[in-house]
Amino acid sequence: LDRLVADGATACATASEYYDQLGAMTVEAWQNEAAFKAVAGGTASKESQDVFQQRLDALARRSQLAQAIGNAYGSVASLRSPGGLTGVAKAGQNLGTALGGIPALPGGSAIDAEAIGQAAQFLVGLKRKSDSRKALASMAKAVAFISSLVADERTLYIAIQDDRDGTSD
């Protein structure tokens, strides 16, 4: 149990850090574009600024979601302790909150996070400490969602890096 919980939490922390790095690349590209436009005697278009802001918002929400999944995953280990159900239910509530309003990345498609919603509902509704295996199975679906999201949006992430690299030249 401890190994599964640790692995799930680590995977989510890694995903969160990756989203934070993509956010930093976005900020760098935005700054580079603004500097280039200023040197050329112009300003970045409103549309360009909006795309950068939308990208930053979407990446920040993905990072928060990955953190919430990791925290919920980690809370399953507390089922063995007195009062553990309360911590798991709270983590489930936080996961449900983090799930609300995850925007699509510019150029990407809408996110279907049904598996995470189900995991959050399961954790909130958990009644017995002996349900740790079911809780882990539910959380495994949430971690699989993050993994598939990264795979599905891979080309968008590469474009973010290309934007940063292209504007820094």
Image (cartoon, rainbow, N blue to C red):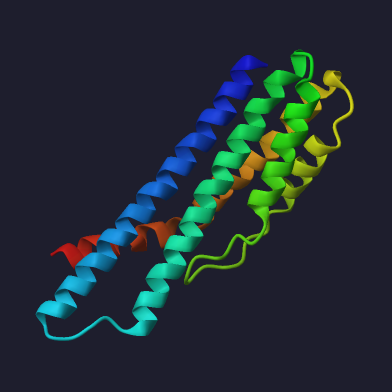
Please say if 33 is above or below 156: below
Q: Residue at x 44, y 65 (%)?
A: 55
The residue furthest right is 127
Q: Classify residue 35 by image quadrant.
A: bottom left
Q: Residue at x 69, y 40 (%)?
A: 141
In terms of depth relative to the viewer, which is nearer, 129 or 151? Answer: 129
Residue 104 x/y as whole percent? 55, 65
Residue 166 x/y as whole percent? 21, 66
Q: Classify residue 7 by image quadrant.
A: top right
Q: Residue at x 67, y 57 (%)?
A: 100
Residue 50 x/y as whole percent? 41, 76
Tell me if residue 128 can be seen. Answer: yes
Drawn side of residue 148 relative to residue 155, left or right: right
Drawn side of residue 59 relative to residue 102, left or right: left
Residue 119 x/y as whole percent? 75, 41
Drawn side of residue 37 relative to residue 47, left or right: left
In terms of depth relative to the viewer, which is nearer, 22 or 27? Answer: 27
Tell me if residue 138 can be seen. Answer: no
The residue furthest left is 39
Quadrant of the rendering where the N terminus is positioned: top right
Quadrant of the rendering where the C terminus is positioned: bottom left
Drawn side of residue 105 relative to residue 76, left or right: left
